[in-house]
Amino acid sequence: MDRVRAIMLWHRKGKAMRKGRYTHRGAGPTKKESDKSVEEIVKELKEIGASKNDYREQSLRIHGLICAKCAREFDYKDRHLLTVHHKDGNHKNNPPDGSNWENLCVYCHDDEHSRGLLGDYFSQDS
Ligand SMILES: [Zn+2]
Ligand SMILES: [Zn+2]
């Protein structure tokens, strides 16, 4: 009887100790949580990237792997050199028919924007 009680007490003690250690290791679970949040951030970034790639891939599919300006053609493996330009400059305007997209190679896209900044204002006035 006494032995059983002792064992029970020992068990309870052990449980309490383990419990105590658990709460004492607060940094452990916190670290795990921060790992999780990093995963979530990565997941979010991937989702943002996915939605970006989504209209990109759509535009490439609609308009083809060719620069709308210099007519340079790209292979599937080089398609990262093609960027999707928003004709009206509004990156949130993504009609599924691709009417606001233009596939431009990175060079032409740079060119388009460096000249476009002022050019767009003038063309809007005229
Ligand atoms: Zn080009
Ligand atoms: Zn652009």
Image (tube, rainbow, N blue to C red):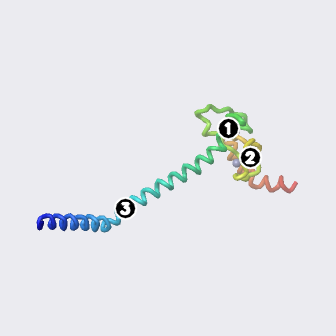
The quarter of the rendering in which ligand 1 is drawn is top right
Q: Disc 3 marks which amino acid?
A: Pro
Q: Position of residue 98 (x, y in %)?
A: 74, 42
Residue carrying label 1: 60
Which is nearer the N-term, disc 2 or disc 3?
A: 3
Q: Quadrant of the N terminus?
A: bottom left
Q: Nearer the viewer, mark 1 or mark 2?
A: 2
Do the residues under discs 3 and 1 have CB atoms within 8 angstroms?
Answer: no
Q: Position of residue 86 (x, y in %)?
A: 72, 48
In the visual, does 75 lie left or right of 92? left
How many marks are shown on the rendered structure? 3
Residue 121 image label: none
Tell me the distance, in whole angstroms, between the alpha carbons under discs 1 and 2: 14 Å
Say few, some or many: other residues with alpha carbon within 10 Å of mark 1 (under 14 / 14 to 19 / 20 or more): many
Say few, some or many: other residues with alpha carbon within 10 Å of mark 2 (under 14 / 14 to 19 / 20 or more): few
In the rendered image, the vertical position of residue 120 relative to residue 28, given as above or below: above
Quarter-wise, where is residue 7 in the image?
bottom left
Residue carrying label 3: 29
Which residue is pictured at 72% across the width and 43% down the height?
A: 96
Looking at the image, which is closer to me, 94 or 120?
A: 94
Q: Secondary structure at mark 1?
A: helix
Say few, some or many: other residues with alpha carbon within 10 Å of mark 3 (under 14 / 14 to 19 / 20 or more): few
Which residue is pictured at 79% across the width and 53% down the height?
A: 120
Residue carrying label 2: 95
Which is nearer the N-term, disc 3 or disc 1?
A: 3
